[in-house]
Image (cartoon, grey):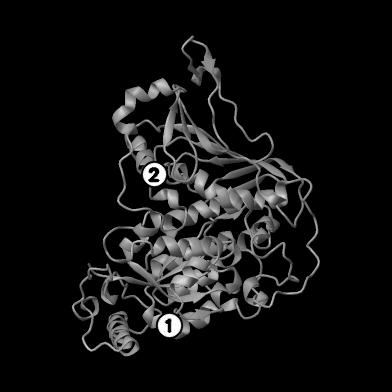
């Protein structure tokens, strides 16, 4: 089992091979000194797993963890769950919010507030980086890690702007590191099943996709909806607010931003579509090779303003024909009337022969075939697909089977870093998905219809929309991240 350490490097990584030897030697020596070993434990001396499951440094992935609370803390637990990865450095702007279990189990792991300092001081000991921070800081943390030759696992949505996603797609090619976005359904039985359905012609000639999500976020509550930025409050002593803001505008601190509600603000988050869309339209976007939409329509943006996301949205996107597949229209709804209507021809019947209205749940997609013979229904995340009416599924029993997968998304990333697997949602896949979501965010922000040139990747005759594609001008001190890859 060989750790997959890419030998391509940035200026700050001089020699991937010598770094590996140095790190291994360093860990072996430090362990002996720290614990006073007279005889080196077998997992260190022989490079073999011992009876307690300890792996030698050469056979495990050393993680630098950027973001240790909330989803970031959960990612650390999942990435290290099977013992094939170990945190060697923690970075967070507010450790009072860090995952208690992770911190308790790793009391001696060095802690940093600035990921740049962490990578400067401990880069030679880090193989891969997990990034679970607010959306607006994903890009800078990922790019800095990639420049230093580190594999990266980044929470969804991948970036905060279309341009940032474009740059990370380019960085993946340039630096040759392994990349993965945290849309964890992409490594699941549901994902394999959907891919098999496409190959078998069940998911075929899809001309319409209806996607929906119940309006559950705080800013979608009329009683909490605001149209101005909150007033400033004292910054908690545990928080480095300047680093939390990172490359974007530094507003006065408010508890409405940290630790969680930042997602509702355009300045820091990507709203419901940017968040849940990565789990809901993930499969069709990848396996149907949708790419980017050429047209967007703001059908309904309720409670529109330029501070927080709408009370509810109804957006439509048009994807042109591609590679033998017909043009496809996708609608997204997260308003009070989010649930799509299914024609009665797709309903099942009860024992008395009476039609029974299907239950669709609070999130999912309906895929419409051109021939209209049946519908394909999918939920979100890891869920499997089903056919409507359900009686249709009997004809495709073998294809609809759900083969068990050896690893979940997090462990699959670790196994890929070790050379035992491949990543399933690299930036070449998750980047265009994120860009599609962020184009929807631009449509929400402007509350207008948009045309998009697929060749130039710019909106047609809308300068303001193109400024939003590029994102805000980075704050002083962060400009270097936004230079051409």
| Residue 272 position within the rendered picture, expressed as x and y whole percent measured from the top left | 62, 49
Closer to the camera, 102 or 310? 102
Residue 169 drawn at (x, y percent): 46, 62
Q: Position of residue 225 (x, y in %)?
A: 77, 50
Q: Is residue 36 left or right of residue 75?
A: left
The residue pinned by badge 2 equals 191
Quadrant of the rendered image containing residue 174: bottom left
In this picture, residue 67 sits left or right of residue 56: right
Residue at the disc numbered 1? 122
The answer to which image quadrant residue 418 occupies is bottom left
In this rendering, the answer to whether 404 lies above or below 210 is below
Residue at (63, 72) in percent of width and height? 244
Residue at x-position 79% and y-position 63%:
230
Q: Marks 2/1: CA distance? A: 36 Å
Location of the N terminus by quadrant is: bottom left
Task: Give the vertical position of 363 relative to 431 (above or below).
Answer: above
Q: Is residue 247 visible?
A: no
| Kind of element beneath mark 2 | helix
């Amino acid at each position: 089992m060989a750790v997959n350490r890419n030998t391509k490097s940035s200026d700050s990584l001089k020699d991937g091979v010598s770094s590996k030897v140095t790190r291994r030697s360093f860990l072996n020596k430090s362990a002996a000194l720290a614990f006073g070993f007279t005889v080196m434990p077998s997992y260190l001396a022989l490079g073999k797993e011992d009876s307690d499951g300890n792996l030698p440094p050469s056979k495990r992935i050393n993680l630098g963890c950027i973001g240790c609370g909330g989803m970031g803390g959960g990612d650390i637990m999942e990435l290290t769950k099977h013992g094939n990865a170990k945190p060697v450095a923690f970075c967070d702007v507010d450790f009072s919010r860090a995952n208690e279990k992770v911190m308790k189990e790793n009391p001696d792991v060095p802690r940093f507030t600035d990921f740049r300092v962490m990578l400067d001081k401990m880069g030679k000991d880090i193989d891969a980086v997990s990034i679970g921070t607010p959306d607006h800081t994903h890009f800078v943390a990922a790019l800095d890690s990639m420049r230093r030759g580190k594999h990266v696992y980044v929470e969804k949505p991948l970036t905060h702007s279309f341009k940032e996603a474009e740059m990370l797609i380019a960085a993946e090619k340039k630096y040759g590191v392994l990349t993965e976005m945290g849309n964890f359904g992409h490594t699941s039985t549901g994902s394999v099943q959907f891919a098999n359905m496409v190959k078998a012609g069940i998911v075929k000639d899809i001309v319409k996709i209806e996607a929906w999500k119940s309006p559950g976020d705080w800013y979608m509550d009329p009683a909490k909806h605001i149209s101005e930025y909150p007033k400033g409050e004292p910054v908690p002593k545990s928080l480095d607010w300047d680093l939390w803001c990172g490359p974007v505008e530094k507003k006065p601190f408010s508890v409405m931003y940290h630790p969680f509600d930042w997602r509702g603000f355009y300045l820091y988050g990507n709203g419901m579509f940017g968040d849940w869309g990565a789990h809901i339209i993930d499969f069709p976007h990848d396996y149907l090779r949708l790419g980017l939409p050429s047209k967007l329509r703001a059908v309904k943006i309720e409670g529109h303003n330029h501070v927080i996301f709408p009370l509810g949205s109804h957006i439509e996107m048009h994807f042109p024909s591609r590679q033998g597949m017909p043009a496809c229209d996708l609608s997204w709804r997260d308003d009070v009337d989010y649930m799509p209507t299914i024609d009665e021809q797709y309903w099942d019947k009860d024992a008395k022969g009476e039609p029974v209205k299907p239950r669709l749940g609070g999130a999912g997609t309906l895929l419409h075939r051109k021939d209209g013979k049946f519908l394909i229904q999918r939920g979100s995340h890891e869920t499997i697909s089903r056919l409507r009416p359900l009686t249709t599924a009997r004809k495709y029993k073998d294809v609809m089977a759900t083969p068990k997968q050896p690893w979940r998304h997090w462990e699959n990333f670790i196994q890929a870093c070790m050379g035992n697997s491949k990543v399933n949602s690299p930036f070449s896949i998750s980047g265009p998905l994120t860009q599609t979501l962020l184009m929807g965010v631009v449509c929400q922000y402007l509350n207008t219809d948009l045309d998009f040139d697929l060749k130039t990747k710019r909106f047609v005759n809308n300068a303001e929309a193109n400024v939003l594609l590029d994102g805000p001008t980075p704050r002083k001190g962060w400009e270097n991240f936004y230079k051409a890859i």
